[in-house]
Amino acid sequence: MDKKVISTISLAGCFGCHMSFLDIDLKLLELIELVEFNRSPLTDIKTFSKRIDIGIIEGGCSNDENVKVLKDFRKNCDILISLGECAIMGGLPALRNHLTLKECLEEAYFNVPTSNHNQTIPRHEDLPQLLDKVYPCHELVKIDYFLPGCPPSGEIIWQALAALIKNDKLEISKRLIKYD
Ligand code: SF4
């Protein structure tokens, strides 16, 4: 059987979902016999070098760079998975969504005790531009599967990948879904 090709990325997330990926533990040895990793923080490969079977997205979209990367994943991946609550519904970064972007920046750079006190908001053409709010991935591109949890457990990730690799139906037991 040809190995499936997997890519992963973290957008507006905390890398906790990637840590959970590593929590597959010993099954990683089994996984590595079935898949090869391409573009991913796990490999430090920065660009796609072939067509991807399964793309895994951690985090939602908080800035224009996140959107660009997400769209690039959609273009290059046959199956796209939103992994974890940040990808699925914005998660913790989306707590800013009840503020306008202006209010959010003023709070972060002017009002908090640790502000820089010179009343400037960093701006540079090389810096990603913040969006008006944090968007869940499925609002911007088609997502094929959602793996919930914060983070989803290693067991959920393993079960999902095992099913997709074998072209089985993807069914996750609710007892495995946790948010702590
Ligand atoms: Fe981190 Fe939870 Fe978001 Fe995953 S879902 S990136 S663990 S905050």
Image: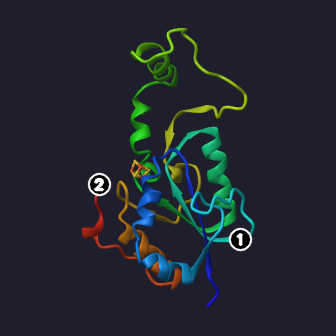
Label 1 sits on a secondary structure element that is: loop
48 and 26: which is toward the camera: 26
Residue 143 higher or lower than 130, as above or below = below
31 and 166: which is toward the camera: 31
Location of residue 99 by image quarter? top left
User: x and y percent of residue 118 in the render?
Assistant: 55, 8
Whether residue 83 is visible? no
User: Disc 2 designates what residue?
Assistant: 179
Label 2 sits on a secondary structure element that is: loop
Mark 1 vs mark 2, CA separation in Å: 33 Å
- What quarter of the picture does the N terminus occupy? bottom right
Can you tell me whether the CB of the residue at mark 1 lies under 8 Å from the nearest atom of ligand 1? no
Q: Is residue 23 left or right of residue 135?
A: left
Which residue is at a point 55% across and 83% down the rendered structure image?
A: 34
Q: Is residue 161 left or right of residue 64?
A: left
Q: Dot 2, how many residues are within 10 Å of its Cα: few (below 14), some (14-19), or many (20+)?
A: few
Q: Return the residue found at the far right.
A: 49
Q: Dot 1, how many residues are within 10 Å of its Cα: few (below 14), some (14-19), or many (20+)?
A: some
Residue 71 higher or lower than 156, as above or below = above
User: x and y percent of residue 17 in the render?
Assistant: 44, 57
User: Disc 1 designates what residue?
Assistant: 51
Amino acid at dot 2: Tyr
Which residue is at a point 43% across and 78% down the rendered structure image?
A: 27
